[in-house]
Image: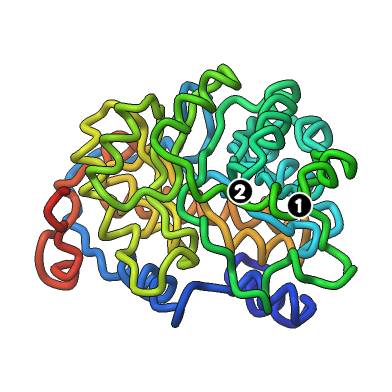
Amino acid sequence: MTRTDFEARAQELLPDYVRAYFHATAGSGASDAEGIGDWSAIRFRPYALRDVSTIDTTTSVLGTPVQTPILIAPMAQQTAAHTEGEIAMARAAAAVGTLLGVSTNAAVPFASIAAEGAPWWFQVYVARDHHLTELLAQRAVEQGASALILTVDMIALLPAAVNPRNWADVPGKARLSNLTPAELAAAGREGSAADASISFDTIGWLRDLSGLPVIVKGVLRGDDARCCVDSGASGIVVSTHGGRRLGPSISSARALPEVVEAVDGRAEIYADSGLRTGEHIAAALAMGARAVFLGRPLLWALSVEGSEGVRTALSELTAELALVMVQLGVSRLDALRPDLLASNGAAGRLERPEAG
């Protein structure tokens, strides 16, 4: 089975409540659909007569070497897709030589994820009870997380009908598994909910608390990106949370050039949301992303074939990226530059908005 088969097969295998959660988007879902469409609308201006006899897809992210610029996005409810959940994701990451993000709502212990040997970053939803966030960050550090991903684009909850917090006691409901029942009980349901009062100061707080670099995920504006870097962020993830932030939101493809320009090399930039093909990934890197994060396509792969499915999806996408690089006339990722992108024609609707 190839990666293009996984989504359809996953729809057949997953329970209704899991399928609804994985597909859930904000509002009408326009942001998700348009996000994929915007990446597909980009057109290239390939080089000619370049030596592409050898293609190199290796890079590094915050100093960590990876064999592919395709990273695994942090995602909750992975044990609802497969019983091994994040353990299977980590095993696949180690097999292909990439890095994974691990959600605050991870369903398995950090130690079990770390044992698979892949580098990982811990994704942080700041809880209203900050003590819970402190405990989770400290435990992530102890188990070898090398950065924190502060997620700032999901303060609002998903509709109750699809929110896993409201699931019955069904397989795959487990979350916040790196906190003890006693710790969760002491904080209460409200204490473990997302803190809507976070600010740019939160970046420095997490950096000082953990001693790790902080990446801010969910930035779609140049002015916000500059403020994040000014406040100590080491990286920015341009993301719509897979269309879950706001229905009529600008897409990652539209927002990425503005963020890259605003940051001006002072931090690493990553992209996610809507990336589905090697062409999409090449476009993101040409716009200035250091790497990309992949979400739903890997959930479908996990649902169908566990770790082996994720490995297949990542390997096939990396091979597809390598082929696109040949077609573009570039042999290394750092040769993917903005001048490879058309500024008119089919990509005209992706013209960059004015920076804030």
Q: Callout 1 environment at 10 Å: few (<14), some (14 to 19), or many (20+)? A: many
Label 1: state its secondary structure: helix
Image position of 31 with respect to 143: above or below: below
Residue 267, image x, y percentages: 33, 29
User: Which of the two residues, 71 or 278, is positioned nearer the viewer here?
Assistant: 71
Residue 208, image x, y percentages: 53, 18
| Label 2–label 1 contact, CB within 8 A | no
Q: Residue at x 69, y 32 (%)?
A: 131
Amino acid of disc 1? Ser
Q: Callout 2 environment at 10 Å: few (<14), some (14 to 19), or many (20+)? A: many
Q: Residue at x 49, y 66 (%)?
A: 244
Q: How is the image coloured?
A: rainbow
* Left or right of residue 265, residue 97 in this image: right
User: Residue 99's quadrant in the figure?
Assistant: top right
* Left or right of residue 334, residue 134 in this image: right
Tag 1 residue: 307
